[in-house]
Image (spheres, helix red, strand yellow):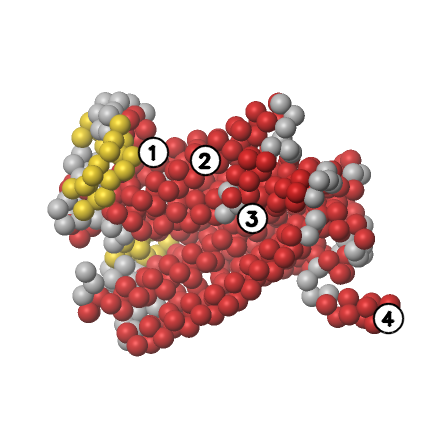
Amino acid sequence: MVHGHDLPLTIARIQFAFTVGVHIIFPAFSIGLSVFLTFLEGMWLKTNDDRYLNLFKYWLKVFSIVFGMGVVSGIVMAYEFGTNWAGFSAKAGPITGVLLSYEVMTAFFMEAGFLGVMLFGLNRVGRRMHYFATCAVTTGTLISMTWILASNSWMQTPQGYVIDPKTGHFLPHDWLAIIFNPSFPYRITHMGLAAMLSVAFTVAAAGAWHLLKARKNGTQADSTIRLMFSLSLWMIVVTAPLQIIAGDMHGLNTLKYQPAKIAAMEGDWTSETRAPELLFGIPNMKTEHTDYAIGIPLLGSFILTHDINGKVPGLKDYPADQRAPAPIVFFSFRIMIALGGLMLLCGLWSLWLRRRQRLFDHPLFLRVILAMAPAGFLALLCGWVTTEVGRQPWTVYGLLRTKDSASPLALSSLSFSMLFFVAVYLFVFGSGLLMLIRLLRAAPEAADNASDDIMILGSHHHTVSQNKDAS
């Protein structure tokens, strides 16, 4: 139950969770899609196969929308740090503020400098110059991810700092230790693979939709569509098992540095060796017990420690006011794992169908891939919830509590801004999603007869002028 004096803090947390939950989808989409675009354009330059060029133009339109929505949604969070989380900004700002400034000065400037060439320059600059611009934008998205995850990872596993005894502010002592903190290598790998896997399923779903449409019309899908579908499934085959390996390594790191989070993820209340793996249960924070638990003996210790005799931490090892809300973390983690397993199965299924030469004409497989379109992003969001909620009650793990990070805001102002954000986000990003769906409903080969100007957003005036001339 939330007490009255805790309600402003709760709303501030929900508001930030909502805004960052919407925002995180777009950078992940941009990261994965930029890598895919770089591959497509590189293959076009190498093979001179126009199918790669058509796919590049097709997904470039999507990238332009996603990138723009990512920038807009990210600006809101910068304001929230100052308005709702002044305590955090004041105390941790000397470190996190600098890292985020590096992101703007390096990644964002690089992206902004070459994005125009990438979007509008295909018919205006040389092929190699345009490919350089595409590579620069992709590099910018990866650098951006690096700085943001360095900042967030430091909040999870802080090191390289000193605390000012007068102000309580965190001051940088060793920047290399701050950036390359213990969880950073695992988190950046996990996030990068999640971005590529999410985009792979989006691309695969678009291909499946067009293949099913052609099947319904009694025709054969264009070779460009089949190439897109095949490439996306190869991407799934490669990234899905790598993501599971990276997740396992990340779990070992979390067990070492954030054992209380692991206890919440597993729903374990007492530390024990030879622990079972709970497939289902409902962690009860009041009774300190996981109700209706269904588990597999020994598997918990084996997964977490790679030893059936390994010791697994329990929530009772930590004071009640230092425990994360176990039910949220428990279920978000399991949803993420279930989706990851389904994505791996889809990759293996595709290999079997490819071997039997039925990859493009198996209706059940195509429908499953279409239904799995949001799976990567849903898994990413569940992973983010597991990571961030599992860190509670801390913003800087073990050092700065969430309640001490918040601004002293009135309930009325927080409630109004929360409702305003929800309404605006639903309208703006709902409209963006509908626009993306409309773009993806068009077949990639339609790009053959379109000019570079018409295909890119912001060319509406040029299109209207052409229509007037034609009439």
Question: What's under tag 2, amino acid-wise?
Answer: Leu
Please name whichever residue, 375 or 22, is drawn nearer the observer in this view of the structure: 375
Please name whichever residue, 101 or 225, is drawn nearer the observer in this view of the structure: 225
Q: Are marks 2 and 4 in contact (CB under 8 Å)?
A: no
- Residue at image position (31%, 66%) is 11
Q: Which residue is mark 4?
A: 471
Q: Position of residue 345 (x, y in %)?
A: 48, 31
Residue 31 image label: 3
Q: Which residue is mark 2?
A: 342
Question: What's under tag 1, amino acid-wise?
Answer: Leu
- Residue at image position (56%, 48%) is 31
Q: Are marks 1 and 4 in contact (CB under 8 Å)?
A: no
Residue 252 image label: 1
Cα separation between marks 2 and 1: 23 Å
Q: Residues within 10 Å of mark 4 (few under 14, many from 20)?
A: few
Does residue 180 appear left or right of residue 144 in this picture? Answer: left
Please name whichever residue, 148 or 361, is drawn nearer the observer in this view of the structure: 361
Q: Label 1, secondary structure: give it.
A: helix
470 is higher (above) or lower (below) than 455 = below
Q: Are marks 2 and 1 in contact (CB under 8 Å)?
A: no
Which-is-in-front pick, marks 2 and 4? Answer: 4
Question: What's under tag 3, amino acid-wise?
Answer: Ile
Q: Residues within 10 Å of mark 3 (few under 14, many from 20)?
A: many
